[in-house]
Image (spheres, rainbow, N blue to C red):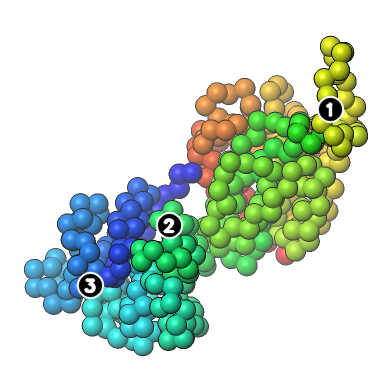
Amino acid sequence: MTYSLQGKTISLGVTGSIACYKAVDLASKLMQLNADVDVLMTPSALRFLTPLTFTAITHRPVITSMFDPQSELSINHVAAAERADLVAVVPATANSLAKIAHGRADDPVSATILATRAPVLVAPAMDANMFESPATQANVELLRQRSIYVAGPAEGRMASGLVGRGRLLEPAELVGHIRILLGRAGDLAGRKIVVSAGGTREAIDPVRVIANHSSGKMGYAIAEAARDRGAQAVIVSAPTALPDPTGVKVARINSALEMGHALDRECADADAVIMAAAVADWRVAQIAEQKVKKTGADTWTIDLVKNPDLIAGIHADRLVKVGFAAESEDLIDNARAKIQSKGLHMIVANDITAEDAGFAVDDNRVIILDREGSIERLPLMSKYDVGVEILDRVIPLLGSLA
Ligand code: CTP
């Protein structure tokens, strides 16, 4: 998914762990998202990597000393602390966690944390025994109490060869955590947004299913956009090849009936439901318990019964309901009729015959219609940006229902 961090300055504090090679990848990912990245390194980090590695990626000088008269920033760590929208310590060693917890300021990273007003994320990386030690655990607890965001560590194999909890999260996950922290006070903070995604599967027998071409990308992108604005985002997901987005709850289901039950559970305390899933209209009347064998016949008839309309069944007096309409003809008329029949506040219609938009690709071109009769044609854009546009229109409705 493409989503920009344009205009955001991230101060990336790198401390001395072998995992600091992942900080290079993280810096690169943040640059690809158009963030401005200031790197600060501790003396121990300098034993693993050179400042040149980061400068080549960030196109900015790396702050390696508290007292560098050559620096373009006069009091460098203080300036970095002030201009940061977020300070991320990746990787954070046991020693650096201890320093941050106790307010030390004897290297550029700990000094920046002391000086900043921006939100702070630490991503621990160390030997499992060091992480589990009472001293480190107490320090982590102290950091959490001070609203410092602790990302990870993960379970897994560490550089020592041992397996345990202490592995630095992967850069893609760290980007997700950075986005969560940046969006924490966003305009969806305190709201729960439920999104359905993917194509449901109706079993015929233990090996066969009736499925459809939905990839789930649209629904996952909406949930990520909601997460990035501070929402508690939940995806009720039919089978997809997509990984769980960081910080988003994913409830996995197969059939339309299972999706209905999961939606009932999740919507009970939700503020909005956005139905991006392609729900099977029909299910097999009698699912065979054993694999159906080829008989002598040349045809096979399967009886189907209608599935309930899931979005129509969700009561709209306390939550905003957004539907999708995938159409191959009479787009506007069909979409309008679905607003009525399903009791929607809004519908997002797309022409599934377009090759550059819709199923399985990263972009979409949609028309948003609402109850009041407005019709907005949006240009081709990333599915994440379509999610942003939908949420921009959901937010004012949330106010009217609250
Ligand atoms: N939908 C639903 N439950 C169903 C079928 C569809 O909740 N059993 C939702 C979809 O997730 C989507 C909207 O209704 O948000 C419209 O889906 P679509 O397939 O376009 O419409 P249908 O109601 O199935 O009508 P038709 O297939 O006749 O176009």
How many C-alpha atoms fall within 10 Å of the one at disc 2: few (<14), some, or many (≥20)?
Answer: some
Residue under the point 52% across and 35% down: 363
Q: Residue 174: horizontal and vertical position, in percent? A: 43, 60
Lower sequence index among marks 1 and 2: 2
In this picture, is 248 found above or below 109? above
Q: Secondary structure at mark 1?
A: loop
> Residue under circle 2?
170
Is residue 39 shown left or right of residue 191?
A: left
Q: Quadrant of ligand 1?
A: top right
Q: Is mark 1 within 8 Å of ligand 1?
A: no
Residue under the point 58% across and 41% down: 241
**Which mark is nearer the camera, 1 or 2?**
1
In this picture, is 182 found above or below 390? below
Q: Which kind of residue does numbered mark 1 sit on?
A: Val
Q: Secondary structure at mark 3?
A: loop
How far is disc 3 from disc 1 in space, using C-alphas? 65 Å
How far is disc 2 from disc 3 in space, using C-alphas? 21 Å
In this picture, is 394 found above or below 83? above
The quarter of the picture where residue 355 lies is top right
Q: Residue 196: horizontal and vertical position, in percent? A: 69, 47
Q: Which kind of residue does numbered mark 3 sit on?
A: Ser
Q: Which kind of residue does numbered mark 2 sit on?
A: Glu
> Residue under circle 1?
292
Q: In the depicted view, which residue is nearer to us: 346 or 161?
A: 161
**Which mark is nearer the camera, 3 or 1?**
1
> Residue under circle 3?
44
How many C-alpha atoms fall within 10 Å of the one at disc 3: few (<14), some, or many (≥20)?
Answer: few
